[in-house]
Image: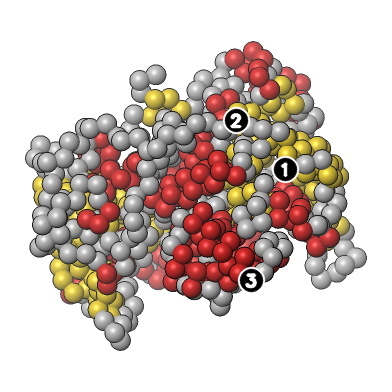
Amino acid sequence: MAKWDYDGPILEIENLSISFFTRLREIPAVMDFSCVVQPGEAMGLVGESGCGKSTVALGVMQDLGVNGKIVGGTIKFKGRDLNKMSQAELREIRGSEIAMIYQEPMASLNPAMKIGLQLMEVPMIHEGVNKEEAYKRALEVVTDVRLPDPKRMLDSYPHQLSGGQQQRIVIAMALMTKPSLLILDEPTTALDVTVEAAVVDLVKDLGKKYGTSMLFISHNLGLVLETCDRLCVMYSGEAVETGSIEDVFDKMQHPYTQALFRSIPLPGADKNSRPLVAIPGNFPLPHERPDGCNFGPRCDYFQDGLCNTGDLKMVKIAGNDRHGSRCRRIDDIDWNAPVQVGAQTEKGEPGEVVLKIEDLKKYYEVSNSALFSSAEKKVVKANETISFEARQSETLAIVGESGCGKSTFAKVLMGLETATDGHISLKGSAIQNIPIEERETETVSTVQMVFQNPFDTLNPSMTVGSQIIRALEIFKVGKNEQDRHQRMLELLDLVKLPRAFAERMPRQLSGGQKQRVGIARAFAGDAQIVVADEPVSALDVSVQAAVTDLLMEIQRQNKTTLLFISHDLSIVRYLSDRVMVMYLGHVVEIGTTDQVFAPPYHPYTEALLSAVPIADTSVKKRHIVLDGDIPSAMNPPSGCPFQTRCGWKSKVAGGLCEKDVPPVQTLANGHQIKCHLNAEDFETMEPVIQMAAE
């Protein structure tokens, strides 16, 4: 079917309602949702998990499964109602006129087919072109998405590509037919922040080149700011505010939008003097929505008899560009009132050194072929000469891309692996060569871990209480069962969960509640060092604020040392006292948070900071996009590990960067950078992130 010309809006969704039907009841997933996407416009859909963002996208694709049904409203694509099209017409449009990019790239790629054939299939099926023309198009589009050596890429299988390369191939596949509408559902969630920055850059450029309209689904307000022209904020199945980026970010007119912004760590937030304000209460389940405003029970401005009666409609806000809000109290609220600061706390002073790492190395020996044990062995250098100290009551953040050695170091510290070389001193005792099964109970309980995914760390067949009691038994806490039961209830109090949760099963808990159980378990043996490995990355932004606040509160009470592993530099800036930056097994920079977030930087730190999406229109960032992917730890580059991607390499004479591993330079106040640049070069560095007032 030929593409039809149309000079009106590309997508018009009007009063859309979508429900899912179970044997027990109808579950409304989206109610009274409206939005318009004009040609070449990028519309962002933001909100917490379960708010209906992806359901809207699947409604546009007419792909709601057997239980999902559009029960009201219309979805028009180029003026034609998608609900009234036949399956044959929809098949013609999907992939050709409307394309969708999903969160997990491997879900869209066939692992048994070469990339070239998968790309060629698209125009051959949709447009009937021959193989030669299809190959030419595939080569062109792989070049457009800035993949190195496009011919080799077309001849590769998906598993031979990195996550970032796979996502670019999926974007290339979506663009093969030059669609009029591209739907992106959390397309960068699984990617490193530097890869995310490059992919977002790419999507913006390709949108301009092809004139494609976009519906960009994300929970990251910073990403939406960088990619979209307009946005729609969703809460519990409804659009609660919509407008241009400038209107919604700078003149927000809905309490939920305001609450979302207060719960994310923007520049200027500080865990002691300007703590984040978490949204109170919990997100309502679809069959437990309140009367009136869905956000009412969690709203600071709730008024009984007004906010909890009748249906609320989207109200137009005069004077702004298609700005609307679903709130009855818009005119009563002083939207410019200063934010009420959360409870301030005294900054804790770091105590004695409890952990000392000196020249730690962790190498893995692997065969080139798993089939033949006699094959040539290769060494993966996961950690290279890592040295640092951590003190009581201190939060040390460890940051870097996937594969930089953060989690390997954590495994060695926990005793899940033993060190190849170097020393780990825990309160004066050497533990680098003692595996966890040989460690004393006191040592195991002293160093505990909170993992990234709360869904994977709890036993689904045991109650919450019994899982915490099991940890207490292992750590030999309490004289008898009664003691341990009492301590378990106290740990639930510590992580601010109701004591009644002791009888609940993990499936009855939300993600944030599960993570709190994981934290309670970590502190069951009075842990003095807690390794938190991406503890909030799987959680919604509103829940992140509550969990980080909880970690800080427990740290103040227990004087815990927190090693916070993360790739989210916004949250690192907010809660860490010191920051250690890792790249390909090396520590390339270490210093206080203020030192690491201001020049001079290691060139890699500079690029990391540039890649962080910040949800603030007043922030100006220097734009640095790294070339290429992070090298393999099995075959690292010679000399400086970062030299293959470094923009400052030309400043260093004599090819030193390619030949020698750089020395560690100690700058002012103990700030260390592992780099060949000299003092004069460091002095010329400009800030990456600047507030408009600066």
Q: Earlier in the sequence, mark 2 or mark 1?
A: 2
Residue located at (68% from left, 61% from top): 477
Quadrant of the rendered image containing residue 274: top left
Residue 329: mark in rendering: none
Residue positioned most to the right: 374
Residue 175 appears at what percent x and percent y?
Answer: 40, 56
Let me know if residue 585 appears in the view.
yes
**Nearest the eye: 444 or 263:** 444
Q: Give the CA distance from mark 1 to mark 3.
A: 45 Å
Neighbourhood count class around disc 1 (C-alpha, 10 Å): few under 14, some 14–19, many 20 upward: many
Tell me: residue 461, above or below residue 283. below
Residue marked by disc 1: 585
Contact flag, marks 2 and 1 (Cβ < 8 Å): no
Q: Is residue 317 left or right of residue 139?
A: left
Q: Earlier in the sequence, mark 1 or mark 3?
A: 3
Q: Dot 1 lies on which element?
A: loop
Residue positioned most to the top: 680
Which amino acid type is shown beneath numbered disc 1? Answer: Gly
Tell me: residue 486, above or below residue 151. below
Q: Give the CA distance from mark 2 to mark 1.
A: 30 Å
Residue marked by disc 2: 349
Residue 395 appears at what percent x and percent y?
Answer: 60, 38
Q: Give the CA distance from mark 2 to mark 3.
A: 37 Å
Residue marked by disc 3: 481
Q: Dot 3 lies on which element?
A: helix
Image quarter (top left, top right, bottom left or bottom right) of the C terminus: top left
Contact flag, marks 1 and 3 (Cβ < 8 Å): no
Q: Dot 2 lies on which element?
A: loop
Residue located at (52% from left, 63% from top): 489
